Image (cartoon, coloured by chain):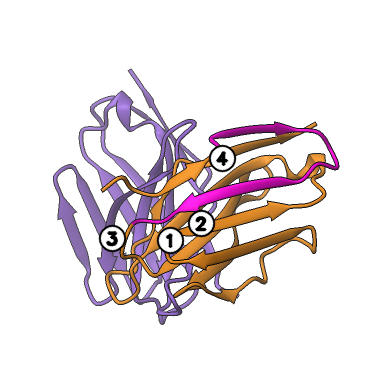
Amino acid sequence: DAGVIQSPRHEVTEMGQEVTLRCKPISGHNSLFWYRQTMMRGLELLIYFNNNVPIDDSGMPEDRFSAKMPNASFSTLKIQPSEPRDSAVYFCASALAGDTDTQYFGPGTRLTVL
Amino acid sequence: GEDVEQSLFLSVREGDSSVINCTYTDSSSTYLYWYKQEPGAGLQLLTYIFSNMDMKQDQRLTVLLNKKDKHLSLRIADTQTGDSAIYFCAESINNFNKFYFGSGTKLNVKP
């Protein structure tokens, strides 16, 4: 299995631009999670889906952030407009509910907003 | 909400044992996990323990769970320089797989 795939691996953009991060979960997994990691705040859960339905988006910082999961094999996290304080590493993880609940992480997208 | 705490740093010499500790507050956790993060990489699952177990051993790794004190530890025997990384503990509370992560412990292994 290829594991969780994220793209791009690195993104540099200017303040005010729209940023879209992509994630392909492990085939057969039915839960998907978006995390943000910074030095100051550590690892934060932004939103998670179960069977493509958003279950908890209480970690989404503000309305500039949105996430979708149109099907079981694809999810996006969009930031519009982006700000320098959004600079972080964004991780996607997937899991199979009813298994050991283990989450498998992607390699992350390092986002820099200038 | 749930609170998972870890010390921030641990420094050991190569060949010694490392013990990384974690405390949590929710007694209804179902599984507890240890993840390893190397620089520039994602989180890699090291091991997990079901909440009705006290101990789990996997090669150089030993996980101890004290449910009464809500204390989880990871022991790495014969620590190597390649073990230098950040180690995260996490718990799941049977809620659509939602995890609660600690802040991570940065393990530095000196040659």
Give me the disc on residue B48: 3
Whichever of labels 2 and 3 marks the residue nearer the N terminus, that label is 3
Circle 4: residue type: Thr
Q: On the picture, is B1 further left or further right than B44?
A: right
**Residue at 85 percent of width and 42 percent of height:** A16
Pointer 4 local density, CA inside 10 Å: few below 14, some 14–19, many at least 20:
many
Residue under numbered circle 4: A109
Residue under numbered circle 2: B102
Circle 3: residue type: Tyr
Q: Assess whether mark 1 and mark 2 are in contact (beta carbons under 8 angstroms).
A: yes
Q: Is A23 in front, or is B77?
A: A23
Chain letter for mark 3, please: B
A31 vs A43: above or below: below
Spot the residue most to the top.
B111
Residue B101 position within the rendered picture, expressed as x and y whole percent measured from the top left = 50, 59
Under circle 2, the secondary element is: loop
Rounded to the nearest whole Å, what is the CA distance between mark 4 and mark 1? 22 Å
Residue under numbered circle 1: B90
B53 vs A110: above or below: below
Which chain is painted in purple? B
Circle 1: residue type: Ala
